[in-house]
Image (tube, rainbow, N blue to C red):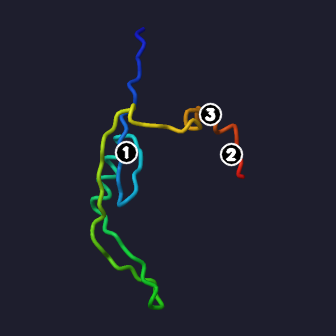
């Protein structure tokens, strides 16, 4: 039986407005597709009913990145299972 080596998952950075988010490439493409249909809204509380002012489409972009472009904090290098066993302490 042949041993399959799993290829590292391709990652992408999605920019929504002024914030960047790291996602697997397939998920990033879905976010980009969904956000291309979105319009920005502002809440308006000047009347008794909450109203929403519709604005323009948000600025959305996607950049596919290489794994060597990521600088992960040391805490992120631990496995998910070890993080699940150890609760985080708040200072």
For the view shown, which residue lies furthest in the bottom direction? 47
Residue under the image location 41 percent in, 83 percent down = 51
Q: Earlier in the sequence, mark 2 or mark 1?
A: 1
Q: Label 2: how many residues lie within 10 Å, few (<14), some (14-19) or many (20+)? A: few
Q: Position of residue 36 (x, y in %)?
A: 27, 59
Q: Which residue is mark 1?
A: 27
Quadrant of the drawing holding the N terminus: top left
Q: Which residue is mark 3?
A: 81
Q: Earlier in the sequence, mark 2 or mark 3?
A: 3
Q: Quadrant of residue 16?
A: bottom left
Q: Label 3: how many residues lie within 10 Å, few (<14), some (14-19) or many (20+)? A: few
Helix, strand or loop under label 3: helix
Mark 2 or 1: the one toward you: 2
- Residue 47 appears left or right of 84: left
Q: Which mark is residue 87?
A: none
Residue under the image location 44 percent in, 91 percent down = 47
Q: Which residue is mark 2?
A: 88
Q: Position of residue 20 (x, y in %)?
A: 39, 52
Q: Circles 1 and 3: CB distance less than 8 Å?
A: no
> How far is mark 2 from mark 3, CA to CA?
13 Å
29 relative to 19, above or below: above
Using the image as rendered, state which of residue 77 and residue 46 is in the foreground.
77
Q: Label 1: how many residues lie within 10 Å, few (<14), some (14-19) or many (20+)? A: some
> How far is mark 2 from mark 1, CA to CA?
27 Å
Q: Earlier in the sequence, mark 1 or mark 3?
A: 1
């Amino acid at each position: 039986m042949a041993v399959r080596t799993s290829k590292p998952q391709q990652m992408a950075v999605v920019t929504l407005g002024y914030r960047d988010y790291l996602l697997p490439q397939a998920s990033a493409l879905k976010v980009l597709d969904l956000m291309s249909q979105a319009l920005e809204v502002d809440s308006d509380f000047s009347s008794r009913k909450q109203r929403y002012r519709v604005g323009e489409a948000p600025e959305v972009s996607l950049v596919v990145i290489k794994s060597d472009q990521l600088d992960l904090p040391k805490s992120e290098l631990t496995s998910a299972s070890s993080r699940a066993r150890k609760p985080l302490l708040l200072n």
